[in-house]
Image (cartoon, rainbow, N blue to C red):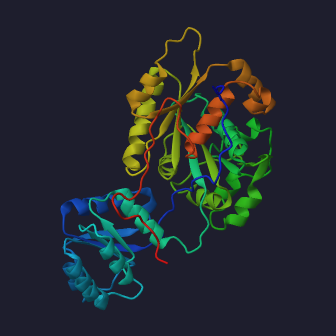
Amino acid sequence: MDSPDHTIHEPSGDVPSGARLVPRITIQAFCEQSQTAQIIEDAAHDRRMSKVALTTHNGGLGAAVETYKTNPTPNLVIVETTLGAEEVLDALSRLAEVCDPTTRVVVIGHVNDVVLYRDLLRAGVSEYLVMPTTTPTIIEAISDLFAAEGAAPIGRTIGFVSAKGGTGASTIAHNTAWAMARALRQDVLILDLDLPFGTAGLDFNQDPPQGIADAVFAQDKIDAVMIDRLMSKAANHVNLLAAPAMLDRNYDLSDDSFEQIVELSQQQVPMVVLDIPHMWTGWVRRTLTALDEVVIVAEPDLANLRNAKNLADALRAARPSDADPIVLINKTGMPKRPEIPPEEFATSIGCRLAGTIPFDPGLFGTAANNGQMIAEVSASHRTNEVFKSIAMQVTGRSLPRDGGRASALGLSGLFKKRKRA
C-alpha cells in the first residue's frame, strides 16, 4: 500500500487566463422567444460586457432583414430562429443582402444538427448556438469573436478583502501570492490598493521609491511600459506595486481609478493579486466586480458573519454570471472567544469554505516584524499548506479536500464553441 502523500504536486501547464473584457462594440439581438431575450439582456449586465451597447428586439431573422433595409448594421447581430435547416439558410441569404460585410452574425437555433452547423459556418455565420443556452455561453461566444487575433492570454485577477477590519486579509493575500509563485513558478504581481495604510512593502521588507500611487495619479499617460517600470521585485516571481502608506495627500479616488492599472497588469503577468482595503466606496465595488476570483477573509464571529454575507450578496448581484466569492476563516481557536464553526459560517453566507487558519500571534507577529512570509519564518508550519491550497483554488487548479464543488461553464449539447479558421 502506498504511503499517504500530503504534498502539493507541481502542476503542469499554464494558469487559466482571466476573463477578457469585450471591446467597445454595438450588438443588436432579434429574439423570437422572451426566454432568449432575457438571457441576452442578462449578458448586458455582466462585467465583461461593460463597454458594449446591446439592444434586443422582438422577432427573428425576418425582423432583422426588415430593420437593416433602412438602418445601418452593428458590429454584431444575434438572431434567434425556430426555422428548419433549409429555411434558415434562405433567410440568412436575405440578411446578408442588407448587412454590412464587416458585421458578424451569431445564430441561436432550436435544431441540433451538425450538418446545419457546418452549413451555417460555410455561409459566413460566426457562431451557431443551440437552445437551451445560457448567459455565460452567449458572453463567451461574443468574447471569442472580438478578442484580438493572436492576442496573448491575460493574467488572472484574485482579490482579497476583509469582512471586518483587522481580520488579516493583507497578510493572507501576500502569503498566498508567495505560495502561488512557489507552487506554479510563474510571476505574480501584488497590487496594494490601500494607498494610505498599505502593508505590502512592510511584509516583504521593501521600500520602493515608486509604486501604485504613481500609476493612479498618472492616468493620462499610464501604459504597460510604465507599469513595468513601477514594479519592484520582492522575491523570485513575486512583484509589487506597493502603496506609499503616507498621509501627505488625500486619496479621494474615482470609481475607475484602478481599472486601467489592473488591465495593464494583466498584460504583464499571469497572476495579479489585489490587496483591497476594508471599506465600501465606488472604486472598491467596481474593482471587486471586475475580478476573476474574490476571497473574503473573516474571523468566526457574528459581526464578520453579517459583513461577509453582505459582501457576498452584493458581489453575487453585481456578478451574476461569475463564480461566487469564497471565504477563508482566519484566527480560529482564539482563547476564550466564542466562535461560529467555519462550516456553519460558510453555509450561512452561501459561500464555499476555502480553508481555515488557526490563531497564532507568535508566528504571524514574528513574520510581520521581520518583513518575511510565514514560509520563511517556519518552512514546515502547517499554515503553509493552507496558503498553498488557497493558491491552487484561486488559480483554478484544485478544490479543498472536503469536496467543495466547482462550476465549469461551457457549451452544452452537441456543439462546442470554436473560432472560425
Q: Nearer the viewer, residue 286 or 67?
A: 67
How far across and down, in percent of the image, does residue 94 sit? 25, 88
Total numbered circles: 0
Whether residue 197 appears in this view of the structure is no
Instruction: Look at the image and tell me whether residue 26 can be seen.
Output: yes
Residue pushed farthest front? 1
101 displayed left or right of 110? right
Question: What residue occupies the far bottom of the structure in this picture?
Answer: 97
Residue 328 figure quarter:
top right
Q: As displayed, is residue 153 above or below residue 235?
A: below
- In the image shown, does 387 or 28 lie closer to the viewer? 387
Q: Quadrant of the N terminus?
A: top right
* Residue under the point 76% across and 37% down: 202
The residue lying at 26 percent from left, 83 percent from top is 89
- Front in this rendered view, residue 39 or 67: 39
User: Nearest the camera: 91 or 76?
Assistant: 91
